[in-house]
Image (cartoon, coloured by chain):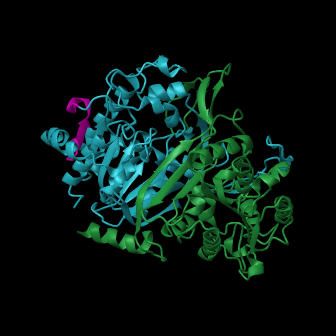
Chain colours: A cyan, B green
């Protein structure tokens, strides 16, 4: 427990350099798609599709094969490598790899932070999100579910609970002392997409395929991706050198908690959770799951930011004003696990 | 130490393309979202959303505000800059910025090619595509239209016309001498998403906002984005130092052809167009539009690859086996326009 305080007091103080001014030398960059399956639709009627843009109507036969349920992954490989394994970023449901790039108000994000520190960085878009694409519904993915601006504002703990949203920015009730750049909320909203009701199994399969391709690795998973990461790590524990779960929304398979006893695990929590029923519930479930890991002989560490004196963080701590301070704590923890040289 | 050897082996065998290049030094990289609008839904019933993943059903009130119709843009800024203006990549409908990244079979794409030559590169995802996200339908975007694998195979001129597709790769009829890496067709299919029936006006508005933000610039636009680029350039001709249109599917506003007389324009065409009714039609429309520009005192140049002895190119020439040869022709043309030093 002590190291967390020292990380706050000393590690974080040196962890906020002027990143944008220093050139970044990469030995390679690129992207790939991985996982998924082919589905076939048949017996569906040919229909006429009318263009709302003034084009002619065309007949469309939807029957045939489609490639669906893949992941999209961008990789950035620094010339001077200091992370001993690649660092994989798994975004929350409804978000993409963009959540780790430039913040909505234009500051340096975690992608650039960890790249400048010499980690091989892999940013993914989950199944059904962003450049991972999506296929015919309801045959794949189930149903897309869009969050209103009000729901996002509250869910991510930017606003101070139910009723905090107002379409007039001046009338919104922010969490007191929020670190989220609230003036850029509209810019953040441009990053969000729908969640899906039935992508769980496909997401698990695709991320497992990614781990099989690029790991051993460390994984940094946000929100819903944390729950996925627990389960993937349970099936590939030898491939995961560290798992950092940012406010995971659930634990892994309770019957396989022992599989994680050799996987270093860090849980990171922001502020305002105690007063939020849903987030309190999610945290309690994860803490219970982590206790099962400990009971099986494993370990887990927790950075509870407000308890460490770091106040005001939302669920979107990679975008918060103190995002590089939080990144510094994670960097220190990874280094203490022997994954940085 | 075993894991470090594995990481080294991975790096050598998988992540680094065969055409490994010099390290790339960037003065900055990041992303932004731009454009779009807020819509409000009202009077819609609250409905129950059932999770197909085993979670509990939840009540969903869809009424409220949504942020929609933005672009997503990634930027990569080389330390040693040789392009005198940024180079913007605008993907075809149904594709994203990924189309200019690593090719489906893992070779260097146009993003890396032009970055290594010292261009500031801006890769965008069009409205409704990839990380640009999409909003509630039909209130925004109209209707998503998915292409079957067969339709993609034919439309992009990988297959030799109607009936060329077969679910068995060995039975597919390829265009004779195709440059497309046909063994990676499934990997390419993972890059594709739906087109939309009503995103034309929003796409025009968002790309105009992008031009206002980052130009003067050169634009490289693919397929449907070429038609958009003509219209954007017609409203901002002073901002566009060069426009490279890769097989555009249509011309600009015929009443404003004269607006483009000062904009250097290059049209690039691949192979097999003569035998393809739709592509022949699109080319004829664009050639007619380009003639209007010339009649108004402007210029246009055409690289017709097969006429230049470069055979076998599909509509996806940025992914074709000779993609860097085609990129070299574009690079030379941009340099001849005085945009490279």
Relative placement, left or right, of A180 versus B201 is left
Quadrant housing the N terminus of chain B: bottom left
Among all residues in the image, which is located at the extreme bottom? B309
Q: Which residue is drawn at 21% across and 33% down?
A: A308
Question: Where residue B175 sits in the image (x, y, percent)?
Answer: 75, 75
Question: Where residue A158 sits in the image (x, y, percent)?
Answer: 42, 27
Q: Which residue is drawn at 29% across and 50% down?
A: A260
Relative placement, left or right, of B244 versus B51 is right
> Where does the magenta region start and end?
A294-309
Which quadrant would residue A313 be assigned to in this image?
A: top left
- Viewer-proximal residue among B196 and A290: B196
- Viewer-proximal residue among A171 and B131: A171
Question: Where residue B258 sits in the image (x, y, percent)?
Answer: 81, 54
Relative placement, left or right, of B263 versus A60 is left
All told, the count of numbered labels is 0
- Viewer-proximal residue among A340 and B300: B300
Among all residues in the image, which is located at the extreme left? A2
Q: Is residue A279 visible?
A: yes
Which quadrant would residue B257 be assigned to in this image?
A: bottom right
Question: Where residue A81 sits in the image (x, y, percent)?
Answer: 30, 64
Residue A330 vertical placement versus B260 (above, below): above
Q: Can residue B128 be seen in this view?
A: no
Instruction: Let me know if residue A317 is in the magenta part.
Output: no
Which quadrant would residue A266 be assigned to in this image?
A: top left
């Amino acid at each position: 427990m002590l190291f967390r305080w020292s990380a706050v007091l000393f590690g974080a103080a040196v962890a906020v350099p002027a990143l944008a001014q220093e050139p970044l030398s990469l030995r390679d960059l690129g992207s790939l798609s991985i996982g998924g399956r082919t589905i076939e639709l048949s017996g569906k009627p040919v229909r006429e599709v009318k263009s709302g843009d003034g084009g002619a109507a065309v007949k469309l036969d939807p029957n045939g094969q489609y490639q669906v349920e893949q992941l999209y992954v961008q990789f950035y490989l620094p010339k001077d490598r200091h992370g001993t394994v690649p660092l994989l970023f798994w975004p929350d449901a409804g978000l993409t790899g963009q959540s780790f790039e430039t913040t909505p108000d234009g500051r340096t994000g975690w992608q650039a932070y960890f790249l400048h520190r010499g980690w091989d960085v892999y940013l993914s878009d989950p199944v059904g999100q962003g450049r991972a694409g999506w296929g015919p519904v309801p045959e794949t993915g189930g149903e897309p579910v869009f969050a209103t601006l009000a729901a996002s504002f509250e869910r991510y703990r930017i606003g101070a609970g139910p009723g905090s949203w107002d379409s007039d920015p001046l009338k919104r009730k922010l969490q007191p002392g929020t670190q989220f750049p609230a003036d850029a909320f509209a810019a953040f909203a441009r990053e969000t997409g729908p969640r899906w009701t039935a992508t769980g199994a496909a997401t698990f399969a695709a991320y497992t395929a990614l781990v099989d391709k690029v790991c051993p690795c460390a994984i940094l998973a946000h929100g819903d991706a944390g729950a996925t990461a627990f389960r993937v790590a349970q099936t590939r524990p030898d491939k995961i050198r560290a798992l950092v779960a940012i406010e995971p929304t659930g634990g892994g398979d309770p019957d396989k908690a022992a599989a994680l006893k050799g996987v270093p695990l860090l849980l990171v929590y922001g502020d305002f959770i105690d007063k939020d029923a849903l987030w309190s519930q999610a945290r309690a479930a994860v803490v219970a799951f982590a206790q099962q890991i400990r009971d099986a002989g494993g370990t887990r560490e927790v950075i509870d930011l407000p308890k460490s004196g770091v106040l005001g963080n939302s669920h979107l701590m990679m975008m918060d004003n103190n995002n590089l301070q939080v990144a510094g704590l994670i960097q220190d923890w990874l280094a203490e696990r022997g994954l940085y040289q």
